[in-house]
C-alpha cells in the first residue's frame, strides 16, 4: 500500500498518463477514448484544465455537426457524428 509521498508521485504520474493518452487519442480521432481518459483524469483532479479542454473539444465536434443537421432541416447525414460511441457508450 502506497502512503504519503509515494502515493502523490503515483497520482501525478497517473494523471499525466491519462492526459497524454487523451491527447494521443485526440490526434488519432479516437473520440470515445479521449473522453474516457479525460474522465479518468477528472476523477483525480476535477478542475484539471487540460482534461476539461480536451473533453470539450470532442464534445464541440459533435455539437457543431448536430447543430448543422438542425440548420439543414434534419436532412443531414451525420456521417458518424453521433453522441454514441462505437461500443454504444454516450460520450457526454
Image (cartoon, rainbow, N blue to C red):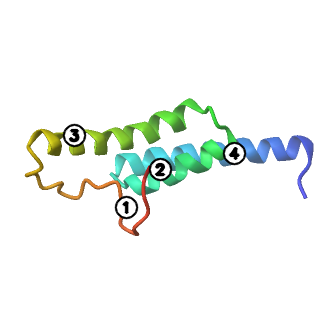
**Disc on the earlier residue, 1 or 3:** 3
Instruction: Identify the residue at horizontal 15%, vertical 45% (top origin).
Output: 69
Residue depicted at x 10% and y 51%: 76
Task: Please indicate whether residue 10 sits to the left or right of residue 72 in the image.
Answer: right
Tag 2 or tag 4, which sits nearer the N-term?
4
Q: Residue at x 36, y 46 (%)?
A: 27
Quick one: which residue is furthest to the front in this view?
73
Q: Are marks 2 and 3 in contact (CB under 8 Å)?
A: no
Q: Position of residue 52 (x, y in %)?
A: 51, 35
Residues at marks 2 and 3, CA–CA distance in whole angstroms? 20 Å
Task: Read off the residue under disc 3.
Answer: 67
Q: Dot 4 lies on which element?
A: helix
- The residue under the point 8% across, 43% down is 72
As drawn, 68 above or below 36:
above
Question: Mark 1 vs mark 4: which is more N-terminal?
Answer: 4
Q: Which residue is mark 2?
A: 35
Q: CA distance from mark 1 to mark 4?
A: 28 Å
Mark 3 lies on a secondary structure that is helix
Among numbered discs 2 and 3, the one appearing first in the sequence: 2
Within 10 Å of disc 4 (Cα), the crowding (few <14, some 14-19, many 20+) is few
Assign a secondary structure to mark 2.
helix
In front of the other: label 4 or label 2? 2
Spatial distance from mark 1 to mark 3, Cα to Cα? 18 Å
Q: Quadrant of residue 82?
A: bottom left
The image quadrant where one finds the N terminus is: bottom right
Q: Are marks 1 and 2 in contact (CB under 8 Å)?
A: yes
Mark on residue 13? 4
The residue at which mark 1 appears reads as: 85
Q: Position of residue 8 (x, y in %)?
A: 81, 41
Amino acid at each position: 500500500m502506497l502512503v504519503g509521498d509515494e502515493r502523490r508521485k503515483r497520482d501525478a504520474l497517473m494523471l499525466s498518463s491519462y492526459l497524454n493518452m487523451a491527447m494521443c487519442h485526440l490526434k488519432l480521432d479516437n473520440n470515445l477514448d479521449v473522453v474516457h481518459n479525460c474522465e479518468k483524469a477528472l476523477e483525480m483532479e476535477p478542475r484539471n484544465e487540460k482534461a476539461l479542454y480536451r473533453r470539450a473539444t470532442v464534445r464541440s465536434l459533435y455539437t457543431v455537426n448536430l447543430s448543422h443537421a438542425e440548420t439543414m432541416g434534419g436532412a443531414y447525414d451525420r456521417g458518424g457524428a453521433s453522441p454514441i460511441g462505437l461500443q454504444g457508450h454516450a460520450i457526454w
